[in-house]
DNA sequence: AGTAAGGCGGGCA
DNA sequence: GTGCCCGCCTTAC
């Protein structure tokens, strides 16, 4: 029985480079859209290097959201993957977004 | 066992 | 747009 955290990572790992997902989508993939907060906690507490692309997770409104090492750092990482960000907003958010359906 | 914390989400002033 | 509140859930103390 893997922990909730690991379950989150497992899903997050399915997000391909250059795309993003939201805490909510992950939560839905886990079965309950209200788990979003817990998901954020998971990424915050456990960053598990390179294995988990925590920076590809943004807020449901398309804004970057937070990051343990600084939102600015997160934005840089995303941009380095080809994702464009202006004023903390993901450009083409709806296009780059991976829905929970894609995780199943 | 109770409580606080957390990278959220949605709604409303 | 900003700020505040409430809801929801898991982990750590």
Image (cartoon, coloured by chain):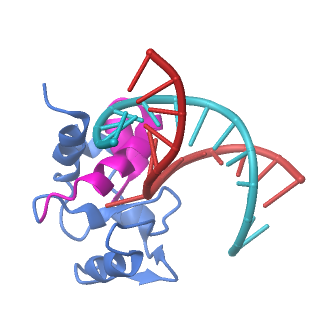
Chain colours: A blue, B red, C cyan
Is A91 situated above or below A51?
below
Q: In percent of the image, x 18 and y 61: which residue is there?
A: A16
Q: In this picture, is A96 found above or below A15?
A: below
The residue at the point 39 percent across, 81 percent down is A72
Q: How many marks?
A: 0
The answer to whether B9 is drawn above or below residue C2 in the figure is above
Relative side of A25 to A89, left or right: left
Quarter of the image with the C terminus of chain A is top left
Res. A80 image quadrant: bottom left
Residue A74 spot, x, y in % from top left? 33, 75
Residue nearest the viewer, comparing A68 with A77: A68
Q: Is residue A54 left or right of residue A62?
A: left
Q: Position of residue A99 (x, y in %)?
A: 35, 48
Q: Residue at x 31, y 73 (%)?
A: A69
Dividing the picture into quarters, in which one does residue C6 lie? top right
Characterize the magenta stretch by its predominant secondary structure. helix
* Residues shaded magenta: A21-49
Q: Nearer the viewer, residue C11 or A9?
A: C11
Q: Nearer the viewer, residue A80 or A100?
A: A80
Give percent across and percent down for residue A68.
Answer: 34, 66
User: Residue visible at 29% across and 67% down?
Assistant: A55
Task: Check residue A75 for magenta coloring.
Answer: no
The quarter in which the N terminus of chain A is drawn is top left
x%, y% of residue A8? Answer: 25, 43
- Nearer to us in this view, A78 or C8: C8
**In the picture provided, is A86 more to the left or to the right than A6?**
right
Q: Is residue A28 magenta?
A: yes
């Amino acid at each position: 029985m893997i922990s909730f955290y690991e379950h989150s990572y497992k899903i997050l790992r399915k997000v391909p480079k250059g795309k993003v997902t939201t805490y909510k989508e992950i939560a839905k993939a886990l079965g309950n859209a209200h788990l979003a907060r817990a998901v954020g906690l998971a990424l915050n507490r456990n960053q598990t290097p390179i294995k988990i692309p925590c920076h590809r997770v943004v807020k449901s409104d398309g804004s970057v959201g937070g990051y343990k090492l600084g939102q600015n750092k997160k934005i840089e990482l995303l941009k380095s993957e080809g994702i464009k960000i202006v004023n903390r907003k993901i450009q083409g958010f709806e296009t780059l977004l991976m829905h929970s359906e894609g995780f199943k």
